[in-house]
Amino acid sequence: EAGVTQFPSHSVIEKGQTVTLRCDPISGHDNLYWYRRVMGKEIKFLLHFVKESKQDESGMPNNRFLAERTGGTYSTLKVQPAELEDSGVYFCASSQQLSYEQYFGPGTRLTVT
Amino acid sequence: QQQVKQSPQSLIVQKGGISIINCAYENTAFDYFPWYQQFPGKGPALLIAIRPDVSEKKEGRFTISFNKSAKQFSLHIMDSQPGDSATYFCAALWGNLIFGKGTKLSVKP
């Protein structure tokens, strides 16, 4: 069974540019989560999809971040315009319906210069 | 309080020794406590998890001890091996995962 995949693995962009991160969850997992780890800090929750619906987006830092999950399969996280403080590693995780077990992807390392 | 406090920040253990990582929480509504293991360049991998109605869970060399009254839980790695060298995160779940800051474990041969 394929795990959670994320693309790209690394992205370096300039302040003010736009970046889109993609996450493909484990097939059949209804729950999809986005997390972020800023250098030296803990991994922090951003938002949670159940199928195509946003269940909880309380962790989204501001309106420069837009997450979508059209069709309830893969998800994208767009940052527009990017700021220096957006640098970090963005993780996606997925889980089955009614399961607590979340499986993480390898992450996308975003560097904003 | 939505924090999970993890200690130590780093840990060096000799091969064959016991590694112990501790976490504490405040929110009694948390109902699931997983530990994740992360190797460089990889995502966190679920290692072992416990529910608050259980005081201990063991899987191979890995054991979680859970003290509900003290609101603390810990990971014990018995017979630590160099391959266990990684960053370990504790977490607590209430809707979404709240993570500790991580412990970098180095097991010396």
Image (cartoon, grey):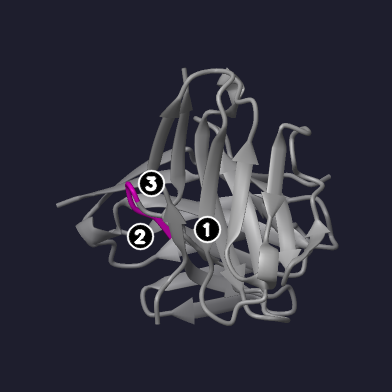
Which residue position is annotated with label 1?
A23
Q: Nearer the viewer, residue B8 or A56?
A: A56
* Residue drawn at x 61%, y 59% as measured from the top left: A75
Q: Nearer the viewer, residue B105 or A94?
A: A94
Label 2 packing within 10 angstroms: few (<14), some (14-19), many (20+): some
Image position of B38 (left or right of A71): left
| Magenta range | B37-41
Q: Where is residue A99 in the image (x, y as percent from the top left)?
A: 67, 79
Dot 2 and dot 3 residues touching (CB under 8 Å): no
Q: What distance separates the C-alpha of mark 2 from that of mark 3?
A: 34 Å
Q: In this view, does A2 lie above or below B38?
A: below
* Residue drawn at x 44%, y 80% as measured from the top left: B59
Q: Position of residue A88 (x, y in %)?
A: 51, 34
Mark 1 chain: A
* Residue drawn at x 65%, y 30% as measured from the top left: A80
Which amino acid is tagged 1? Cys
